[in-house]
Amino acid sequence: MKKPAFSPLLMAGVFLLFISATSPSGYVVGDHAEDFSLKSVNNKMVSLSDYKDARGYIVIFTCNHCPYAQLYEQRIIDLHNKYAPQGFPVIAINPNSPLIVEEDSFEEMQKRAKANKYPFEYLFDEEQKVYPKFGATRTPHVFLLDQDKVIRYIGAIDDNPETPKLAKNRWAEKAVEALMRGEKPNPDFTRAVGCTVKKKPTTAPDPMSASGGKQ
Amino acid sequence: MIAIRLNRFLLFLMVLVCCCLSNYSATGQSFAIYDSMPQLESRIENAKDTTLVINFWATWCKPCIEELPCFEELRERYYGQNVLVILVSLDFKSQLEKKFIPFLKEKQFKSEVVLFADQDANTWIPKISQEWDGAIPATIIIKGQQRKFNLGKFANYTELETFVRPFLADVSALKDSSQYPCLTGK
């Protein structure tokens, strides 16, 4: 009698596991973002709730190595310098595993932040638990949150990676300004070319893969 | 340098003659430059019932470069079996001579190569796949109305072939596939 009673439960459990393991979901516009606590290049833990006066948060998944992230680096600095004084700080998060790209290690993040005088917090999603919640898939990838941590814009900074001056749409700026006026950003979702997020290998790395034969 | 300039001039002429078929062969390997999505779309349409394996890559993208040999392998194994591999680069046109051409010169790909320079990514990306938000590497298989999308790098040749295989049902004799990382062409 017990056996058949157990197996549907087991099946359901397996099904739930399957769902959680395969669903690539992340936040969509309108979702409430869960706060996080990640280590910054200054060696302190940073959460959204630390920003007491914030009217919103410009969360940007970015990294050291990606040429697209590098192209946008100055624009990310500019976004912070322009909007942090108005209550919208940039919070940069590196989602990449240094097991895949050494250049994205915590030490390298510290070096880059120092060399380029990052005015914003540059955090390391070392356990890779934050970026999947957001649904970040590339670097750079912007998530604009309002004061209540509701996602209001997801996408690109602008539409010209190579030449900022020639950008026809400065989506991230427009979205922040819409929020400041109490309006909903339009568009609230854009796409752009970028580098994939570098997920750490699921199996323990063997000596071979550590020396460059990574998957 | 002169040869490159001459070729550039030839390219210019060809673009004038037929904007859809611009071809560039300073490398000993020809490639097309598509400036806008309609050109890529018509290339796809012209393939009719051929199984298209379109890989989006760039010279600056390390995982892309690592998996390119797998696409070359696929091309080789399914040559003459109505399978066409197209390597669509998202390199900047401004880097054409500095990076793109030297890279092709070094690699000498046998697959068809396209430099896709449409900068309006927000418009063209969802036309390739609604599932895609623009990160590369990314691959799409197209056969008639069927499409299948994959984000990220294939770990090895077998993984790529397994992904493509459902589109190859009419291929009578599937060849053996070996499992090796795509790094072999490095």
Image (cartoon, coloured by chain):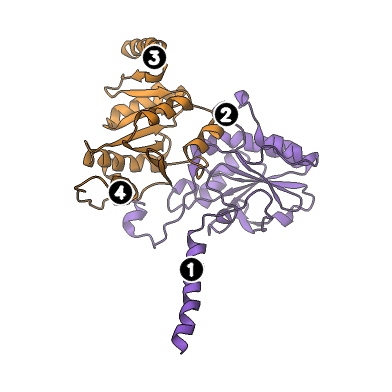
Chain colours: A purple, B orange
Where residue B109 appears, x then y in whole percent?
A: 28, 32
Residue at disc 3, secondary structure: loop
Type of amino acid under label 3: Cys
Amino acid type of the residue that numbered disc 2 sits on in the rendered structure: Asn
**Can you tell which mark lies on residue A160?**
2
Residue tagged by mark 1? A15
Write down the residue under mark 3: B18
- Residue at 61% of width from left, 26% of height from top? A167
Identity of the amino acid at label 1? Phe
- Label 3 crowd bin: few (<14), some (14–19), many (20+), radius 10 Å: few
Return the residue at label 4: B165
Q: Is residue B57 left or right of residue B160?
A: right
Of labels 2 and 3, the one closer to you: 3
Query: Spatial distance from mark 1 to mark 2, Cα to Cα?
Result: 43 Å
Q: Residue furthest bottom?
A: A1
Indicate the secondary structure of the residue bearing disc 2.
loop
* Residue A40, x across and y down, in percent: 62, 53
Mark before the other along the chain sequence, 1 or 2: 1
Q: Residues within 10 Å of mark 4 (few under 14, many from 20)?
A: few
Separation of marks 3 and 4 at Cα, in angstroms? 35 Å
Are marks 1 and 2 in one subunit? yes
Q: Chain of mark 4?
A: B
